[in-house]
Image (cartoon, rainbow, N blue to C red):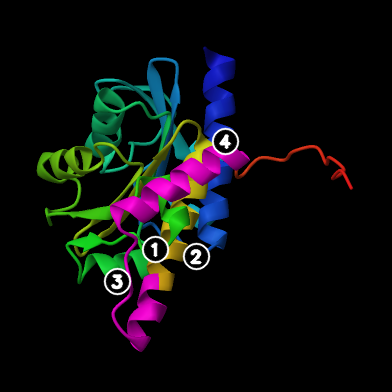
Amino acid sequence: MTAAFDAARVAVAEASRQLAAEGLLIGTAGNVSVLVADHVAVTATGTVLSEVTPDDVTVVDRHGRVVAGELAPTSEIDLHLGVYARHDAAAVVHTHAPAATAVSCVLDELPCIHYQQLLLGGAVPVAPYATFGTPELAATVVGALEGRSAVLMASHGAVTTGGDLAKAVENALLLEWVCRLYLDARVLGEPRALDGEQQAAVVTAALERKYGTTQPHHEKES
């Protein structure tokens, strides 16, 4: 497993630096993890996320015991382990992204205001506030993630998941974009939300047109 652990630690470090460069991870606030078979590679506590190296990533088992690395894992390790125990996710990203955090300080739910939000599961719930690093916070976030790949944490930040690390990062970027869109629209008035029928129509159209995938060009018949 050594080679797999090494590769996962490199990937988590790269993802952390990417998210920091995008402004979603600031200082030591936030954490990133990925599954490695029955283990989890996760950023260490106190790590400056814009400067993460593989040595700043720790591998733990499903009980949180360190099996590789010299540093203690993030204080939010219970949150990461809880997500993997209950949901079909292979990676978790927790950020204190500015727009997402701002929305989490005001709303109880981010309504579905743009069709791309459906990639996150639609409306994004705001999990009730709990102190960082506690089992209570982990439990509320894990529960709120049911049926979706993004959740906001009241007066705290955001969590996204994915089938791989790249997807979890992509979802974090998408969530921040939607939150910024909501904040910009709210300046003009109350943002409209897509209703159930409109959301279903988007799903149908996306499936029919294979939306989001490259396709060969076919000449139209004259």
Select label 2 or label 3 by which is in front.
3
Q: Quadrant of residue 187?
A: bottom left
Q: Which residue is mark 3?
A: 102
Instruction: Please tell me how crowded label 2 is: few (under 14), some (14-19), or many (20+) other residues with Cα within 10 Å.
Output: some
Q: Quadrant of residue 149?
A: top left
**In the image shown, does 150 or 158 lie closer to the viewer?**
150
Q: Is residue 193 magenta?
A: yes
Residue 11, which numbered label?
Answer: 4
> What main secondary structure does the magenta stretch of the protein show?
helix
Q: CA distance from mark 4 to mark 2?
A: 19 Å
* Local SS, label 4: helix
Q: Which residue is mark 2?
A: 23
Instruction: Please tell me how crowded label 3 is: few (under 14), some (14-19), or many (20+) other residues with Cα within 10 Å.
Output: some
Of the residues shown, which amino acid type is indicated by label 2?
Answer: Gly
Instruction: Please tell me how crowded label 4 is: few (under 14), some (14-19), or many (20+) other residues with Cα within 10 Å.
Output: many
Q: Quadrant of residue 146?
A: top left
Residue 111 percent location from the top left of the image:
28, 62
Q: CA distance from mark 4 to mark 3?
A: 29 Å
Q: Is residue 96 magenta?
A: no
Q: Residue at x 57, y 61 (%)?
A: 21
Residue 2 percent location from the top left of the image:
54, 15
Q: Earlier in the sequence, mark 3 or mark 1?
A: 1
* Local SS, label 2: loop
Q: Magenta residues, as a range? A: 182-210
Q: Residue at x 19, y 60 (%)?
A: 154
Q: Is residue 1 above or below residue 162?
A: above
Q: CA distance from mark 2 to mark 1?
A: 7 Å
Q: Are marks 4 and 3 in contact (CB under 8 Å)?
A: no
Of the residues shown, which amino acid type is indicated by label 4?
Answer: Ala
Q: Is residue 182 above or below residue 7?
A: below
Q: Is residue 187 above or below residue 181?
A: below
Residue 97, which numbered label?
Answer: 1
